[in-house]
Image: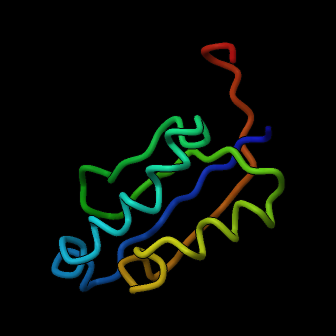
């Protein structure tokens, strides 16, 4: 299954809103991670946003998953980029 990288850029009010929506955000990712479709995810340590590596059938499928994320729905991210990604190291 193809890989995609989602980069969510935090909105100015994200720091205050993030704790309110973190449980739902993790709940959204948990079944994907359990299925092996989210091998890596987390916030940037500089507070600028987050990164999620996601397996999806297509770019449209990746966007569909990202669009339902509570951090997107509730405006923690004010900009989201989703791009196809090719893992070369370590070899899959």
User: x, y (%) of residue 68?
Assistant: 56, 75
Position of residue 33 relative to residue 66, above or below, is above
| Side (left or right) of 3 relative to 15 | right
Position of residue 31 relative to residue 28, above or below, is above
| Side (left or right) of 16 relative to 56 | left
Q: Residue at the location (45% across, 82% down)?
A: 78
Q: Quadrant of residue 11?
A: bottom left
| Side (left or right) of 47 relative to 89 | left
Q: Quadrant of residue 64?
A: bottom right
Q: Residue at the location (27% across, 78% down)?
A: 14
Identify the image's colour scheme: rainbow, by chain, secondary structure or one colour: rainbow
Residue in front for this viewpoint, 9 or 72: 72
| Side (left or right) of 84 relative to 89 | right
Question: For the C terminus, which image quadrant?
Answer: top right
Question: For the N terminus, which image quadrant?
Answer: top right
Q: Residue at the location (63% across, 65% down)?
A: 65
How many numbered badges does the structure rendering display?
0
User: x, y (%) of residue 45?
Assistant: 24, 50
User: x, y (%) of residue 66?
Assistant: 59, 67
User: x, y (%) of residue 40?
Assistant: 47, 38
């Amino acid at each position: 299954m193809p890989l995609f990288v989602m980069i969510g850029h935090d909105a100015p009010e994200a720091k205050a809103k993030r704790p309110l929506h973190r449980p739902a955000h993790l709940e959204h990712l948990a079944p994907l991670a359990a299925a092996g479709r989210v091998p890596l995810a987390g916030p940037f340590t500089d507070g600028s946003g987050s990164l999620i590596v996601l397996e999806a059938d297509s770019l449209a499928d990746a966007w569909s998953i990202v669009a339902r994320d509570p951090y997107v729905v509730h405006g923690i991210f004010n900009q989201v980029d989703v791009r196809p990604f090719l893992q070369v190291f370590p070899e899959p």
